[in-house]
Image (spheres, rainbow, N blue to C red):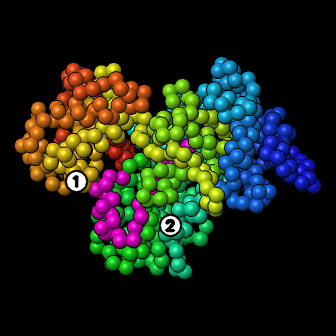
Amino acid sequence: MTDTRVAQAPPTDLRGLVDWLIPDWELTPPTPEAVTLLPSFASKMRECERVCQQPYSEISHEIQDALVLRRLQQMIHTVRLNPLWRERLENAGIIRPPDSYEAWQRIPLSDKETQRDLYMGSRTGMVVPHDRGGFEVVASGGTSSGSPLETVYSLRELSDTYAVAGHFLGTYLLSGHLAGADPKWLLTTLADYQMWSSGTMVGGVLQSVPGVNYIGAGPVTAPVLEHVFSYRGPKALMGISAGIAILAELGAGMSQKAKDSFRVALYGSGVLPQRNRDELKALYPNLVILSYFAATQAETIGLQLDESSPVLTAVPGLHLIEIVDENGRWVPEGEEGELVVTRLHAHEAPLLRLKLGDRMIRRPRLDGPGPGPRAQRFEFAGRTGDILHLNDSQYSAVRAYDALRDELRTAGVVDLDQAAHEIQFVNRREERVITLYAAVDDVLTPAYRVDSLLGPAGLQRVLVNALPRSLSLFNDGEANPTSVAKTGYRLEVRFVPRHSPEIERTSVGKVPLVRDQA
């Protein structure tokens, strides 16, 4: 395709600008072969930066929104080249690209089964067949099920997204913490084995952060951690929550100078318990602890830029992030919904409106009159599977934990935030028992206090008082203590030693918040 815009001045109006950036002859590629010749979306972002004379992350929401919508229109034209995608869209009444974000919300959501059907086995959902080459296949170990799920990426676009996300991470998160003239180090303890995605994909982002030295350490022992932390200069480290939590144990014997050099801990996989945060802060005095939220399908979904706020910030131009209700419509700001992601850099292997299995609270967009990112923001509210089912009612396990923690703290039994390394609910549906497992250092003392201060009747009061405060968004208001009591469910609290096998883990070491047993 020949770009005739070289000699043209870019239009000054918004619609003209985005049509100039993605012209009509690129908007509607006629064949899969033509798709392989399309300029990358990253190149459009760079051209937009040049025209606006600003970093893309700091360009106004109005321009970003218009360019992303134009890209989504291009994606619809592209996926319609694949007969399965075309049939899927037409069955939903989608015969033309959306002319607004309101129209975009009518496009059907994809789930993990859609992904499995279209991108595993013969990979029939690809626009450009994978036998052409130039792709990377990555598999997720799975947070809840542990079952692998494959995703396909174009290598040229994967390289682009690493650069976009790495630059954002370095500019808006790490730069304020990895300061000075000494060498700067960025490590990950994520495992890069069994095709598990995070070690590969997040590592790709981390090694694209400008001005840092990258170490793909994988799981480390205490001597290895001490050796790496002895390097001159400040360190940042990214790992799953359990991999960050164990750094308090692994670093206990290292020198104070090495401890002082640890500046940023980035944790994935949802939530890092307060107990672990306190231990890390006590050992590493200069440390900030921030969330790095990612998934197989999206190497950087959201970054926590400020330790004082749990809000996550999306990388502008990387994905379209949506927080939706049960009908696939955007929830209002301040409300909770399901996380849906569309990867914008996916000419050859697109996947539209994919539900990742996480729940988020939609927060106001990041904006302001001065320099800084203009970006979507949201707050993690738990896995979609983090639901306690009591008969026909669904209770948020994240909020149930918060409510139970408060009840136990008020009763003078135990502060789970301070005592617990790991938490897991097991719902034995047939027996109608919810067991809250807490991995602690001292098992006997809190167990004795539960028995002496509460007993079975007191625990039942805790359950019926806590659960009505933890109903999920779509069931809010349907229960009260009386209705919870009528379910016949009872609560157990079991304290187990750290690393106890009674707490179930996936094959990659993650601890699901909820386990259901029929």
Q: Position of residue 21 (x, y in %)?
A: 80, 47
Q: Position of residue 441 (x, y in %)?
A: 19, 55
Q: Name, please, the residue furthest toward the right.
A: 7
- Which mark identifies residue 94? none
206 or 327, which is in the foreground?
A: 327
For residue 255, above or below residue 317: below
Q: Position of residue 342 (x, y in %)?
A: 61, 39
Q: Residue at x 11, y 51 (%)?
A: 445
Q: Which residue is mark 1?
A: 419
Q: Name, please, the residue furthest toward the left.
A: 452
- In which quadrant of the rendered view does residue 494 lie? top left
Q: Nearer the viewer, mark 2 or mark 1?
A: 1
Disc 2 crowd rating (10 Å Cα; few below 14, some 14-19, many 20+) is: many
Magenta stretch: includes residue 299: yes
- Which mark identifies residue 186? 2
Disc 1 crowd rating (10 Å Cα; few below 14, some 14-19, many 20+) is: some
Magenta stretch: includes residue 401: no
On the picture, is 404 further left or further right than 238?
left
On the picture, is 274 further left or further right than 110?
left
Give SS at disc 1. helix
Q: Residue at x 71, y 39 (%)?
A: 69
Closer to the N terminus: mark 2 or mark 1?
2
Residue type marked 2: Leu
Q: Quadrant of the N terminus?
A: top right
Residue range of the region highlighted in magenta in the rendering: 272-301
Q: Does the image show residue 466?
A: yes
Give SS at disc 2. strand
Q: Residue at x 41, y 77 (%)?
A: 230
Residue type marked 1: Ala
